Amino acid sequence: MLELLTNPSVWAAFLTLTVLEIVLGIDNVIFISIASARLPVAQRPRARVIGLGGALSLRIALLFSIAWIIGLSEPFVTLLGFALSWRDVILLLGGLFLIYKAATEIFNEVEGEAHGPGAADTVKAAFGAVIFQIMLLDLVFSLDSVITAVGIADHIEVMIAAMVVAIAVMMVAANPIADFVEAHPSTKMLALAFLLMVGMALVADGLHFHIERGFIYAAMVFGGAVEALNLVRQKRRRSH
């Protein structure tokens, strides 16, 4: 362990991997903020922490199954000339679920939701479902990052340390981001559009049509910049 701490290449791999994990976790934080918004205000921070803690456990478990992770990229069946691997299946299912979730939330935002007598019971029952959704989607989001970690770092201790730091950053950022998104409806709609885009990218990856993540993040930055200008304009109009 002491040799790892004094090795510059190990530190370089750790810093690189940590930054990658944080960048790749941006879409995850957006999903967490939207998924937890379905809960009562008092339960939201706890749901985010529990969900991210469970997600960290899943990531570490994946890291200890390195050989299995690498094997996910190997095709297990060929259908009409299309080589299908378990990685493709996970990306397809995760992408389709993300598209469904984002489309449903957009519909509820536009059309409104019915509030019947059983609404409180529905919210209480949703706590476990929100935790499950956060962990499940983090598992899908982290699949590529775990495979990337295996390719960047040679020591599993470095991979685990980088993922712990990245999850810690996400835990700190989740509440402020969620509160901001909840306070600005137009921002929430933009975030849902981002989730649709990420879901389409996951489905495309599962079908072997890779979309460079740089394009996706550039679109997110552009959309976020436009929304920031709208928020500034609204604030100035209110002040006048």
Image (spheres, rainbow, N blue to C red):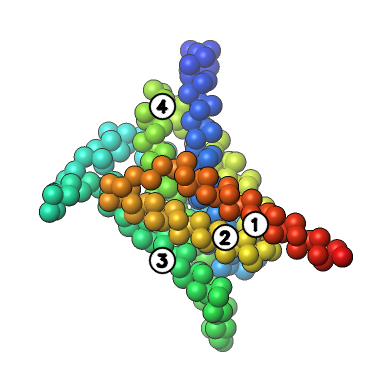
Label 2 environment density (alpha carbons within 10 Å; few <14, some 14–19, many ≥20)? some
Q: Earlier in the sequence, mark 2 or mark 1?
A: 2
Q: Is residue 42 visible?
A: no
Residue 202 to residue 168: above or below: below
Q: Which residue is mark 3?
A: 100
Q: Residue 69's spot in the image, x, y percent? A: 30, 38
Q: Earlier in the sequence, mark 2 or mark 3?
A: 3
Q: Residue 232's spot in the image, x, y percent? A: 75, 56
Q: Nearer the viewer, residue 161 or 92?
A: 92
Q: Residue 48's spot in the image, x, y percent? A: 56, 54
Q: CA distance from mark 4 to mark 3?
A: 33 Å
Q: Is residue 41 left or right of residue 121?
A: right
Q: Which residue is mark 1?
A: 227
Residue 63 to residue 218: above or below: above
Q: CA distance from mark 2 to mark 3?
A: 16 Å
Looking at the image, which residue is at 56% across and 87% down?
A: 117
Label 3 environment density (alpha carbons within 10 Å; few <14, some 14–19, many ≥20)? some
Disc 2 marks a residue whose amino acid type is Leu
Q: Which residue is mark 2?
A: 190
Q: Is residue 231 left or right of residue 219?
A: right
Specify the quadrant that holds the C terminus: bottom right
Residue 148 to residue 120: above or below: above
Residue 90 to residue 20: above or below: below
Disc 4 marks a residue whose amino acid type is Ile
Label 2 with label 1: CB-CB less than 8 Å = yes
